[in-house]
Image (tube, helix red, strand yellow):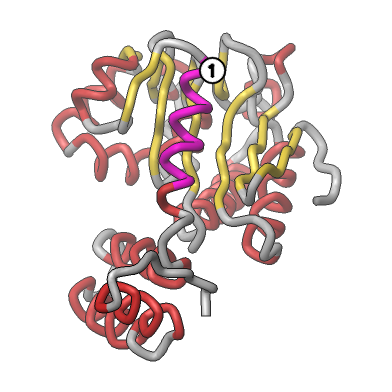
Amino acid sequence: MISLENIKTNLNNGVLTATINRPQSLNALNIQTIESIRQLMTQVYDNPEVKALILTGEGDKAFVAGADITEIATLNEMNARKFAEKGQEVFSSIENCPKPVIAAVNGFALGGGCELAMACHMRVATSNAKFGQPEVNLGVIPGYGGTQRLTQLVGKGKAFELMMTGDMVSAEEALSLGLVNHVVQTQEELHELCGKILGKITSKAPLAIGMVVNCINANFSNEDGYQTEANDFAHCTTTKDFKEGTSAFLEKRKPSFTGE
């Protein structure tokens, strides 16, 4: 793994933990950090040693408390559009990653931080986590996909309420809304549970996992999700993992998948 500015990485048993490391600014996303996330995702896609990714924030106060306001304050219409499009592109690479990505949310996940967490396939949070899209307080709206992903996760009515009021929700309320998958008490439990979930996922057929991502995301794009599912189902039958999985089932043994 190459060194990344503002991100610490640790690869253990195929699970890469990437920690946004700007604790002095509550891990706020500046332009350089967004670029580092882009580089991180290139490594995740290309490195066969990486089987899964955990995204988290340094310290116990914040996952990511938002975008860097000092940078946002200088935007005009032309560079603001490019600013949003760059972030959307990077976050889409997380959402569409064929390897599982979990956000381990410790503390504040606000604005761009909430958008980053929502781009991940799943979210696990500590009990002190807070989620929100408070951009209207600054006279703007979410720009990294938040208007779309929050609506997908919590429904239209609640998304209107949260983005129009700028209110934060607790970890427990986020759990009840479907914004997070699990809530735990401590950071130790947080990383333990993320590792347990990813350990289970990475024991499955890697190509099939990637196709699950593709099919679920097709439902929220302009694609025909059912046709995407049929196409990917058919493609699965051409893989060595399909032959291994079905053979192992019939032979009553544990499958050994290779991602081929």
The residue positioned farthest toward the left in the image shown? 157
The residue positioned farthest toward the bottom in the image shown? 238
Query: How far across and how far down the image is residue 175, in percent?
Result: 26, 24
Query: How far across and how far down the image is residue 108, in percent?
Result: 49, 16
Does 130 sit left or right of 33 as displayed? left
Q: Of the residues shown, which amino acid type is indicated by label 1?
A: Glu
Secondary element under disc 1, as helix, strand or loop, is helix
Q: State the residue position of label 1.
A: 188
Report if residue 140 is visible in the image. yes
Does 126 sit left or right of 47 as displayed? left
Identify the residue at horizontal 55%, vertical 22% (top origin): 63
Does 172 sit left or right of 41 as displayed? left
Residue closer to the observer: 145 or 213: 213
* Residue 80 position (above or below residue 237): above
Q: Main secondary structure of the magenta part?
A: helix
Q: Which residues are magenta?
A: 187-199
Report if residue 78 is visible in the image. no
Identify the residue at horizontal 74%, vertical 34% (top origin): 7
Residue 212, image quadrant: bottom left
* Residue 149 position (above or below residue 184): below
Query: How far across and how far down the image is residue 223, in percent?
Result: 28, 73
Identify the residue at horizontal 40%, vertical 29% (top origin): 124
Q: Label 1 crowding class (10 Å Cα cut-off): few <14, some 14-19, many 20+?
A: few
